[in-house]
Image: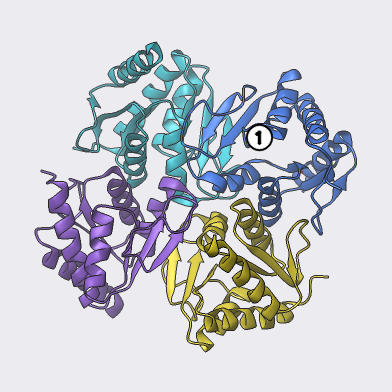
Chain colours: A cyan, B purple, C blue, D yellow
């Protein structure tokens, strides 16, 4: 079950807010819908947001992006989004999200899919934004202990 | 069920052979395992093969590649692999395959997953190499009729 | 005349400092030498720095980078560096700098080469960091007036 | 002195023809003007041509391209063009050509600029298509001897 766009955006906004409350910088694709929702959530908690956009023009990111990275490489930007995060929380059901899941997994980044979301074998899932944020912060904490 | 590496390679080789018999040029990532198997199959039927590799060095593709494209963009080459085909048959279960499925779907390329293979909602599946090849050739034929 | 590495770094540091004093965010490739010098200069004036690195690993940027963008696309990152700036000041004589000049020019970004530096037909030159910064800020101001 | 577009195209066509006569596969950006001229020259001598295009759509290369590689990474395709050749002959004066010169030099590919052409310090020049082709084939031969 993939859920509706509105449901994804509500959850993305919560994820953004929770990450900012924990002192994380939010990195996303800089576009609309879940990307804008996550950035809006992060800004609502005073966080910092980075948007990695596909085109060649400046000022194409959503209004909640602090730092816009203009890649000029189209969908290839999905790789940069996945690679730039210490960890990834996948929200929503677009093909771009699936590409980012694939790249985050390939690069070994801690990764969780927030339900309802894409079904991908071998990737852990979280039933709430709180659980998703806790899960990846715990994994990052474990990494930095070693 | 994802199947074993040997099973994927046997099926990839059949896909390569069938595509070459139908006059198609085979495009793949140019690497080992299923990529090498598909290229080997295409060459066994006198086909032409293109390998789009991630690194910066020449002569890094498998031995069954006729034309090596050296991208220098790492996993970003998955986008070029998906985009360069008229259609895509996904074989095997690597993260690179998942990224290519995501990009082929995003770009609207006719696409089929050969069983056993990755489970991706909304993508048609084929139970045999023959069925996979027929399915995408039919879709391409329907496209060119319009 | 290309000048020495030390001379380029001293000038890059001044450019970074001046840009930060004028409220600009510094975007660079995140690496060593002139990239590190420019970022160090920006931080010395309390500025914000972004480093767009070529590899796939986090924590590979120099120590003066606030926000590290991990592209995973190798030298293709030169395009993202050129595209992410509102304008570009080229310092030093590496092939990466030449690629960034080519991309900034291609994308129509205001662009100046700081002497001593690469000789590229059609690109304006500045004889000092102050002149370079004034020149691009004036061009950006003129743009925003229109 | 950069020369006119017609002059560049005439020389690009000769380069393409000479390379094909020597058994080389021609790799270019697949677009118009000098790219089309070089590919046309190669086909006139029975050669094979590869065009690495920037967009996401198939069938966007010029009519003399045998194998179209669709990268989807915009100007980032300049890296793949430079990297995919064993060597490079730079013809014409576009910013894309300058980016490809920078990348070919960065990757250590044998490289020559055909006059009239861009002025780039440290890159050898040839006064005729014949001289350009001889120069890079000699360098490649020397490489394979070692």
Where in the figure is residue D108, as x and y percent of width and height? 61, 54
Q: Chain of mark 1?
A: C
Name the side, left or right, on which B85 lies relative to C29: left
Q: Is residue D6 above or below residue C107?
A: below
Q: Residue reaching furthest bottom?
A: D44
Q: Is residue C107 above or below residue D135?
A: above
Residue occupying the point 53% across, 81% down: D20
Where in the figure is residue A24, as x and y percent of width and height? 47, 19
Residue occupying the point 62% across, 33% down: C31
Name the side, left or right, on which C102 lies relative to C11: left
Q: Residue reaching furthest front?
A: D146
Whether residue D142 is visible to the viewer of this picture, yes or no, is yes
Tell me where residue A122 sits by quadrant.
top left
Mark 1 lies on a secondary structure that is strand
Where in the figure is residue D30, as x and y percent of width and height? 52, 71
Q: Is residue D34 above or below residue D95?
A: below
Where in the figure is residue B116, as x and y percent of width and height? 12, 50
Residue denoted by label 1: C27
Give neighbour class at mark 1: few <14, some 14-19, many 20+ (Cα, 10 Å): many
Of A92 and B7, nearer the camera is: B7
Whether residue B116 is visible to the viewer of this picture, yes or no, is no
Of B140 and C146, nearer the camera is: B140
Of D60 and A117, nearer the camera is: D60
Q: Residue reaching furthest top?
A: A145
Tell me where residue A4 sits by quadrant.
top left
Name the side, left or right, on which D115 lies relative to C52: right
Residue occupying the point 44% across, 47% down: B74
Q: Is residue C4 above or below residue B83?
A: above
Name the side, left or right, on which B15 lies relative to D64: left
């Amino acid at each position: 079950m993939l859920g509706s766009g509105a449901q994804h955006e509500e959850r993305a906004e919560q994820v953004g807010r929770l990450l900012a409350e924990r002192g994380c910088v939010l990195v996303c694709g800089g576009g609309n819908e879940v990307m804008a929702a996550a950035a809006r959530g992060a800004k609502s908690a005073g966080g910092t947001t980075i948007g990695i956009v596909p085109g060649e023009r400046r000022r194409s990111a959503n209004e909640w992006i602090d730092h816009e990275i203009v890649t000029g490489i189209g969908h290839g930007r999905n790789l940069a989004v996945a690679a730039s995060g210490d960890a990834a929380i996948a929200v929503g059901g677009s093909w771009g999200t699936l590409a980012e899941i694939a790249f985050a997994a390939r690069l070994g980044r801690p990764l969780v899919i927030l339900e309802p979301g894409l079904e991908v074998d071998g990737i852990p899932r979280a039933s709430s934004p709180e659980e998703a944020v806790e899960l990846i912060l715990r994994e990052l904490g474990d990494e930095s202990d070693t």
